């Protein structure tokens, strides 16, 4: 049986661990709420973009080639943006993403990856997958940071190096559940799909604008300017969802670690009390035995 000194040292170590995990849980909770608020703050922008694209759609015959983002092409090489975390301690979040890669994107499929997050970059390098770039993104997930990533992928898409733009990330379902998914972004099937995607993201009811608009210099030029904003907006929203999932997963993992530390601390305290009681009992027995020996 370990001595009381060893048990006391272990109790102190577990208390320190519980204190650290408690602090990390609170930090992750605060960051998760901030990421959710940022996502909600972008809804007015999505509503306006959706309204403008919806009003532009009737001006085009979608059977014709009106923009490279809408043109159908033969898919030879898929382009996948992998969004993972820079740090660990977030449960099975990254592992589930890597499992989805092995299940849905086997080596036989021509895929070029763009990685955001150190864990994803390390995985792709370790598995020797075709990674053409990696980008850092801060916890704040600014639009300028995500725009750099999007511009790089759009450039590769227009040059024909990749034939799709897809985003692989952990969707935020609720605090306890984060589901890994692959979301296609380009090519678009039509303008109606773009409008529907923006409506889902905004979460607001669609209000039909019956006013007549005049587009200068022409509807085609306005559409050419709007579609890049659409792609930036959609992928930026995926980044915000991935960050919320990361902080949520880390908060749950740290809460579980804290609870386990509390249970372990209770067991160690009980063991310490038993060991101390045993030591006291042995000392009393020794004193009584010595006293009895002297009397006899």
Image (cartoon, rainbow, N blue to C red):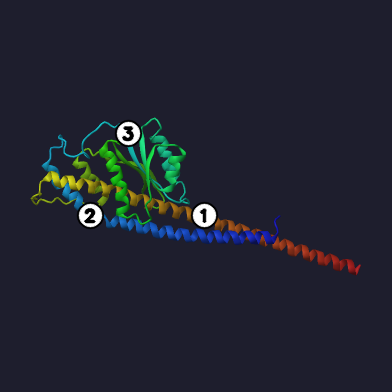
Question: Residue 85: horizontal and vertical position, in percent?
Answer: 42, 49
Question: Residue 229: horizontal and vertical position, in percent?
Answer: 23, 49
Residue at (47, 49) in percent of width and height: 91
Residue labelled with disc 3: 77
Counting other residues with Cα less than 10 Å from the Cα at mark 1, is it few (<14), some (14-19), or many (20 or more)? some
157 is higher (above) or lower (below) than 225: above
Between the C-alphas of marks 2 and 1, the distance is: 39 Å
Q: Quadrant of the C terminus?
A: bottom right
Earlier-in-chain disc, 2 versus 3: 2
Between the C-alphas of marks 1 and 3, the distance is: 42 Å
In the figure, is residue 245 to the left or right of 224? right
* Mark in front: 1 vs 3: 3
Question: Residue 212: horizontal and vertical position, in percent?
Answer: 8, 50
Label 1 SS = helix
Name the disc covering residue 64, or none: none
Question: Residue 174: horizontal and vertical position, in percent?
Answer: 37, 51
Name the disc covering residue 45, or none: 2
The answer to whether any part of residue 236 appears in the image is no
In this orientation, which residue lies closer to the viewer: 99 or 280? 99
* Mark in front: 2 vs 1: 2
Residue at (19, 53) in percent of width and height: 48
The answer to whether any part of residue 111 appears in the image is yes
Earlier-in-chain disc, 1 versus 3: 3
Q: Quadrant of the N terminus?
A: bottom right
* Mark in front: 2 vs 3: 3
In the figure, is residue 288 to the left or right of 115? right
Q: How many marks?
A: 3
Label 3 SS = loop
Residue labelled with disc 1: 257
Label 2 SS = helix
Residue 188 appears in which quarter of the rendering? top left
């Amino acid at each position: 049986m370990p001595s009381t000194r060893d048990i006391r040292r272990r109790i102190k170590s577990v208390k320190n661990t519980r204190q650290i995990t408690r602090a990390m849980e609170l930090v992750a909770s605060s960051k998760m709420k901030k990421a959710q608020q940022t996502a909600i703050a972008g809804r007015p922008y999505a509503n306006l973009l959706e309204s403008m694209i919806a009003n532009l759609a009737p001006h085009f015959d979608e059977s014709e080639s009106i923009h490279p983002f809408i043109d159908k092409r033969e898919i030879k090489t898929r382009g996948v943006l992998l969004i993972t975390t820079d740090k660990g301690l977030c449960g099975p979040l990254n592992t589930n993403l890597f499992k989805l890669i092995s299940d849905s994107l086997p080596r036989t499929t021509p895929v070029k990856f763009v990685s955001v997050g150190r864990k994803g970059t390390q995985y792709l390098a370790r598995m020797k997958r075709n990674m053409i770039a990696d980008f850092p993104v801060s916890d704040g997930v600014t639009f300028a940071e995500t725009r750099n990533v999007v511009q790089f992928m759009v450039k590769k898409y227009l040059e024909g190096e990749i034939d799709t733009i897809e985003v692989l990330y952990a969707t935020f379902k609720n605090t306890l559940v984060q589901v890994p998914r692959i979301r296609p972004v380009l090519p678009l099937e039509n303008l109606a799909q773009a409008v529907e995607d923006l409506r889902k993201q905004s979460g607001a009811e669609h209000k039909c604008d019956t006013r007549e608009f005049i587009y200068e210099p022409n509807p085609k030029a306005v559409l050419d300017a709007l579609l890049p904003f659409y792609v930036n907006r959609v992928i930026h929203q995926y980044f915000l969802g991935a960050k919320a999932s990361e902080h949520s997963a880390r908060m749950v993992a740290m809460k579980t670690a804290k609870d386990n530390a509390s249970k372990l601390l209770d067991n160690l305290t009980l063991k310490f009390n038993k060991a101390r009681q045993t030591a006291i009992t042995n000392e009393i027995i020794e004193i009584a035995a010595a006293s009895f020996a002297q009397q006899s």
